[in-house]
Structures are given as C-alpha cells and as structure tokens.
Image (cartoon, helix red, strand yellow):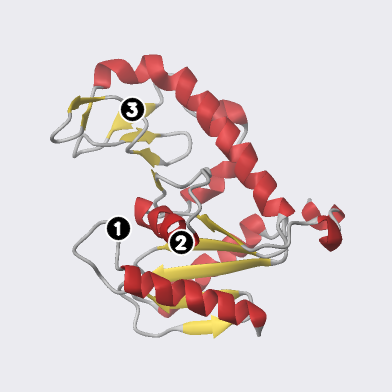
Amino acid sequence: MNQEISDSSKHSEPIFISLGEWCETAFQINRYTKNSEAYFFNWLITPNDSYKSIFLNDTEFFKPNNWEISENLIRVHDKGTGIFFQHEFEVIDKVKNHIDQNKVENHLPIAQSKFIFLKKKTLKAIESFRTIYLIRQEDFNNIDDALKRIQHIKEIFYPLNNNINIILTSREIKEEIQNGKYLILRNERSSSWQGSNESWDRVFNIALNNSKS
C-alpha cells in the first residue's frame, strides 16, 4: 500500500511501535523516546501471532458475547482477535484488579470505537514514516523459532512499508542476530514488569546504530 507513497513525502524522524507481546515493550518505548503517543498494541497482551489482527475488519473487534475472562480474572480475552485486554475494562477489585464481568458487555461499543481509531492511526503511522521500528518482546529460546516470527512479521507488515526494521527481543535466547532490516537481541530479566531499563537502552541503541550502517 505504502509503495505508492514516495520516500520524500514520508516523515524523516524514526518511530518505534510496539507489537507486544506484553505492556513492557510499550512502556520502554515511551521511556526511551520520551514520547507517550498511543498506538494500537501499546498496552495489550498479544500472544502468538495475534498482532496480525490489526488487519481484520472493524466488525471483528469486540463482537457481543465473543469474549471471556482470563483465568487470573485480570484480562478480557477478545476471541475475534486473540488479544487480551488488561487495562480497558472496569475492575471490581482494585487490589487484585479483577475485571467486573457484569460490565464488560456494555463497554464493548466504547472499546470497539477506541481500538478501531488506534488501529487506523497505527497503520497510517507505519505507512507514513521513512524509518520505522516494529518491536516485539517474546521469550523464544530457539533461534529458528525467532527467525520464523521475524519472517511472519515481514509478511504481515512489509506490504505497508518495506523500509520497516524489525526488532525481536527475548529473555531466553542465547544467540543474537543483527542482520540488515531485522534484529534478534537478548533482553535481560528484571524483577519489575517494566523490564530492565539498561537492557532496553542497549536494544534501542543497537537498533539506531544498525539502521545507520
């Protein structure tokens, strides 16, 4: 799609956009860039390949009676997209953050409108920037599986912008790969859900230096 947008008309500054899998990725992007711009996946749990749901029709998001509460009661699982929403729905227990199941259904139209807006905003951003980094934290321990994930992200998002740089980080992987338009990097564990600032700084610095080379 973006192939029709000339490079000269694209935004020249780099942009980082999270593909999940957890909120940690978006938190670290905002911290590092000092930019709190909201995008579709920022505070979502996106297991497996549920990031591809950004290309679904608007009507596939938050269908009535097409959701379930996660086992720990803190997330709403949208069956249409496979995504888990932890911060969108009202809680009944503010200490344990248990979702108020009785209020989920009535909130679906509001949530649908919000995430359709964020979906369109995110896709437009991916099309419009000359240098873009799609980042996903996913704890692969096998480099072949990580490479398969990179390939799938390429297949999904390159039709929008073939200048995309893909960064996949893992706290389990031993081998790292720095190869042109994609990086597979180790990210150290932290006791905090936000992750290790030092380790994430290393990821961002490698990414920016890699794109200059």
Question: On the image, which quarter does residue 142 sit in?
Answer: bottom left
First reached walking from the N terminus: tag 2 or tag 3: 3
Is residue 135 positioned above or below 62 on the image?
below
For label 1, the residue is 194
Q: From mark 2 to mark 1, how far is it between C-alphas? A: 14 Å
Residue 187: image location, x then y, percent: 35, 73
Is residue 151 positioned above or below 102 on the image?
below
The C terminus lies in quadrant = bottom right
**Closer to the camera, 34 or 46?**
34
For label 3, the residue is 89
Q: In the image, 81: left or right of 4?
A: left
Residue 116: image location, x then y, percent: 57, 31
- State the mark number for residue 103: none
For label 2, the residue is 136
* Residue at disc 2, secondary structure: strand
Question: Tag count in the figure?
Answer: 3
